[in-house]
Amino acid sequence: MGAIDIRDAGMTAVIDPDAVLEQVATGFAFTEGPIWNPVAGDLIFSDMPGDHMRRWTAAKGIETFRQPSNKANGNAYDGQGRIVTCEHATSRVTRTEASGAIAVLATHWDGKELNSPNDVVVGPDGAIWFTDPTYGRMDYYGVAREAELDFRGVYRIAPDGGLALVADDFGQPNGLCFSLDKRDLFINDTDKGHIRRFAVGEDGRLTGGAVWAAPEGDLPGAPDGMKIDQAGNLFCTGPGGVHVFAPDATPLGVILTPEGTANFTWGDADLRTLYLTASTSLYRIRTKIAGVDLYRP
């Protein structure tokens, strides 16, 4: 079986049906949160159970970026090229400053500790959006402990640092990404197995939230990491690998992976190499359409 499951002819405009999935590195515990820096030409990603953030470059292979990492999960670059990180073990959202110092951005809501910030994106205005399921309160993926909040929400950190709860009706919110025009925010729900679409107001509030699509299949896997390419196709992990949806939510196909895939990002000079963090390994595959540049210093 090849690496591509074509469900609609439109998939062939996104990726070559004969594209080869290559294992770049292996030997990790559970990989997540990949981010590409086009200036440095490196990929930084998390290995949660290993309490380790790692860096990969073509020249040097795998190196340590940070250890311990408080069981870091999702990462994103902000508008100044600083890394924003979701920490499972501490229930914090932090930012790595240019000096290497760690700034704490969010820890509590309404006097209670956040569940375990999971995935994160930065908006065009510099606001930081993150999901807060309870996975980091499980052993192995985080630190086993009871949740203080009785819901799993989505939050926005305003450019001035103010924290706002923008959605609280999820089973387990996880991956999120903006539409090409930044007017909509897609957020998936691992527990319910679907992707929702919200309209983003000028005041940072979300409206709508209807189910937009659902990755379907009989193989293991669920919605987790999610991103969009420069043609507006939405990629989301799901059963069997990474599912691709057209801008109108038509399911185009699946990039099949031999291990459960939690997240991915585009990299290389042309942003047409999709790097996938899949359980114990890092994989890559070429696409015909470039991903959206998420590094905007």
Image (cartoon, helix red, strand yellow):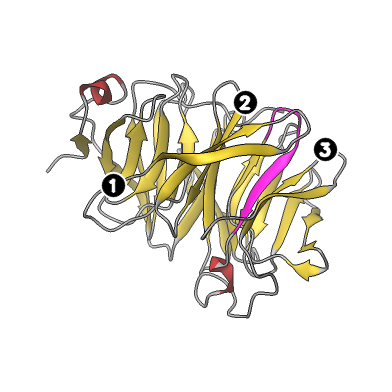
For the C terminus, the image quarter is: top right
Label drawn at residue 183:
2
Q: How far apart are marks 2 and 1 (CA)?
A: 26 Å
Image: magenta residue range: 123-132
* Residue shown at 60% from the left, 65% from the top: 71
Between 221 and 101, the one lying in front of the other is 221
Q: Which residue is the site of mark 3?
A: 159
Question: Which amino acid type is marked by label 2?
Answer: Arg
Q: Disc 2 or 1, which lies upstream in sequence?
A: 2
Q: How crowded is mark 3: few (under 14 residues within 10 Å), some or many (20 or more)?
A: few
- Amino acid on which the number 3 mark rests in the picture: Pro
Q: Residue at point 20% right, 33% down?
A: 7
Element type where label 3 sits in the image: loop
Q: Is residue 263 visible?
A: yes
Residues under labels 3 and 1: Cα distance?
37 Å
Up-down relation of residue 250 to residue 152 (above or below): above
Does the segment drawn in magenta span residue 125? yes
**Percent x, y for residue 284?**
35, 39
Front: mark 3 or 1: 1
